Image (cartoon, rainbow, N blue to C red):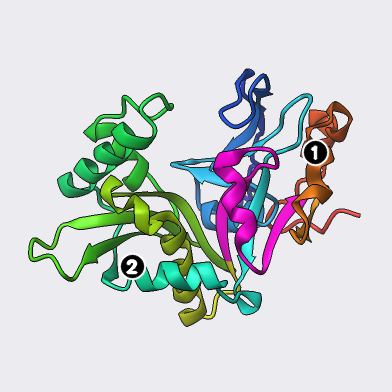
Amino acid sequence: MQHTLPIAPQFYVTAPQPCPYLDGRMERKLFTALQGDAAVELNDKLSKQGFRRSQNVLYRPSCSDCAACMSARIRVADFKPSRSQRRVLKRNANLKHRATSPWATEDQYELFRKYLDQRHADGGMADMDMFEFAAMVEETPIRSRVVEYTDVTREDGQPVAACLTDILDDGLSMVYSFFEPSLEPNSPGTYLILDHVEIARELSLPYVYLGYWVPGSAKMGYKANFAGMEVFAGGRWQDLVSPDKFSGAVDPLSTEPIAEQVARIELPGSQPAT
């Protein structure tokens, strides 16, 4: 009988390009393909080490002179909404969610386009067409859902917000969310996070993964406002009690060589690094 060993994932580094979060900085990503029979296990394992999914790729920032981008997640058991977040829940009480299979619709794409045109007209997704949008939603080798939100006071039943969400073994990962621009005064982005915390609680999942938090970035600062928040820094998850604690992450000396970063990555079936 012939036996074959599983092929270890290969890691690559992107070419440097302007950072979308901090002016004057260059970003670089460490990434690997998410495919094969072990895709689910690989996604679960690397998500716990600060990686994020984009279609069939897992990536993590690996900049040469900066370590400011840190994966962030909420500990569901320790989360309690603040007074302002309770107001957000009240303002959005008319929104109801339903989870669907990861299948792109024209209604979702129309909402997505409105969101981009209003908020990210100059971003990397600005020119995304329906086919590319469908690829973002549907090209997933793991368990994913599109969580759609409708306004119960409207009769058209059209989605007013949505989030592409991965279901991990230890939580929900909010891959990408978007909403009707007219809802902006009601803080829909914050509401989607609050609602995902409740969904995770109902599913007995301990974490909600939010993407990256970047000290010094105005567009990412809101993530520090959630109780029970922790970030992946220095090879481990740490409480985000004081954002000032991580201000040194923008120092060039805060990074380590790519080879050392890859050597520290734990893969499915491997023993924890010491």
Expressed as whole percent of the image width and height from the top left, the position of residue 5 reads: 66, 48
- Magenta region, residue range: 208-234
Could you tell me which quadrant the C terminus lies in? bottom right
Which residue is pictured at 47% across the width and 67% down the height? 194
Residue under label 1: 249
Q: Quadrant of residue 1?
A: bottom right
Q: x%, y% of residue 14?
A: 61, 23
Tag 1 or tag 2, which sits nearer the N-term? 2
**For mark 2, does the 10 Å Cα neighbourhood hold few (<14), some (14 to 19), or many (20 or more) residues?**
some
Q: Nearer the viewer, residue 118 or 162?
A: 118
Q: Is residue 195 visible?
A: no
Q: Which disc number belongs to residue 92?
A: 2
Q: Circle 1: is it few (<14), some (14-19), or many (20+) Cα within 10 Å?
A: many
Q: Residue at x 57, y 71 (%)?
A: 82
Q: CA distance from mark 2 to mark 1?
A: 35 Å
Residue 178 appears in the figure: yes
Asked if residue 213 is among those painted magenta in the image, a careful observer would answer yes
